[in-house]
Image: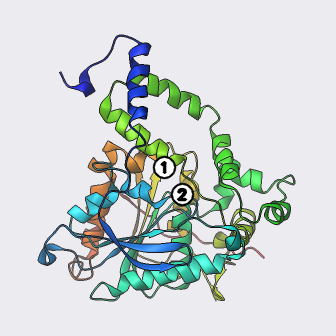
Amino acid sequence: MSASSRRPPGILSSLMALAERVRTGPPKVGQTPADEVWRENKWRLLRYRPTVAKADRWRTPILLVPSLINRFYVLDLAPGRSFVEHLVAAGHDVFIIDWGTPTDEDRYLTFDDICHRYLGRAVRKTAAYGPDGVCHVLGYCLGGTLATIYTAAEPDRVASLVALAAPIDFDHGGILARWTRSPGFDLDALIDGFGNVPWPLMQASFHMLKPTANLAKLVGLLERAWDDEFLDGFLATERWGNDNVSFPGACYRRYIGDLYRDNALMRDTMRLGGKPARLGDIDCPTLAVTFGHDHIVPAPAATALLDRISSPDKAQLHLNGGHVGAVVSRKAAAGLWPQLSRWWAARDTESARGLGDDRADDVDAEPAAAPAPTTTAP
């Protein structure tokens, strides 16, 4: 009988199993081999080493943009739980941004520095590795918001956009939106006092969304600590979930002001690097991915993207699961990951020629409705 199918008789055995695993040290994460191809200030661009013969690889490289406040290795969590590992094995040329760890001097980094200069550099570097000078861009959570804004302002090198659980309409931002818009949320005092917004404060705000989450996780852990496969995934995810970074102050000031408070993307008032960043200017293939139990980014906040862009090739992929679990779980390896791989493959700069409307069938996605009439707020 395998360790994963053997159930000890009581909670004491579960505690002993858990203690033994903890004693061996933290789980290894981010193990897919990669090379650093660019570094600037604290951030760097990684390119994963191919495992497929060059003749069998897809032409268009993929740039993964993680959230600014989370470590990049959530997309390369562990062998068998790595989105990156899956894409490399499928023949994709995969790049990822590691935002690094901001320090005191980074309090002055602006939204344009990060979303226009840094992300723009990553897009250009990634695109240069492909024969057609373009790349697919996937942004996860806040990374998806940044990727969307960049694509709206600078569309030339973006072959396609995937917004993975990415907030776009902040009027549907739930508790976080209501909190940041309340009179008690003194944005200026926060930035002036701390410089960079401390990661424990941001982590506490996410705990506020679901106060019983940690207790529920503890109960689930004690019930399944005997299951080696479950424990591997749980400990790796917890390591990532508690390995956060602070938010550069000047960037945070505009992030809250323009997006959470003014909802500038939906009002067509967002600007990046002096240019308008209008959702209607996005005409590349676009996929919005949402999850049924995502308490951080409600589906209406994410799908608003599809209502406003001009691209005729757009769809929503809606799956069960939560904001993190649906991306790193074993179910993701059988559902989300292969569907995204097929979606990109169908839009490869060479193989996509002549596919026409058949491309809509490469994922179990819901085609987006025609854009509804919109108004611009004064």
Q: Residue 364 placed where, x, y %? A: 31, 55
For residue 44, side relative to residue 78 (left or right): right
Quadrant that contains the N terminus: top left
Looking at the image, residue 132 lies above or below residue 286: below
Which of marks 1 and 2 precedes in the sequence?
A: 2
**Mark 2 near mark 1, Cβ–Cβ under 8 Å?**
yes
**Residue 66 visible in this rendered orientation of the protein:** yes
Q: Residue 272 placed where, x, y %? A: 63, 82
Q: Quadrant of residue 252?
A: bottom right
Tell me which residue sits at (57%, 33%) in the image: 214
Local packing at callout 2 (Cα closer than 10 Å; few below 14, some 14-19, many 20+) is many
Give the residue pinned by disc 1.
Answer: 240
Looking at the picture, tell me which residue is in the foreground, 260 or 125: 125
Give the residue pinned by disc 2.
Answer: 70
Quadrant that contains the C terminus: bottom right
For residue 260, side relative to residue 34 (left or right): right
Looking at the image, residue 336 lies above or below residue 292: below
Disc 2 element: loop
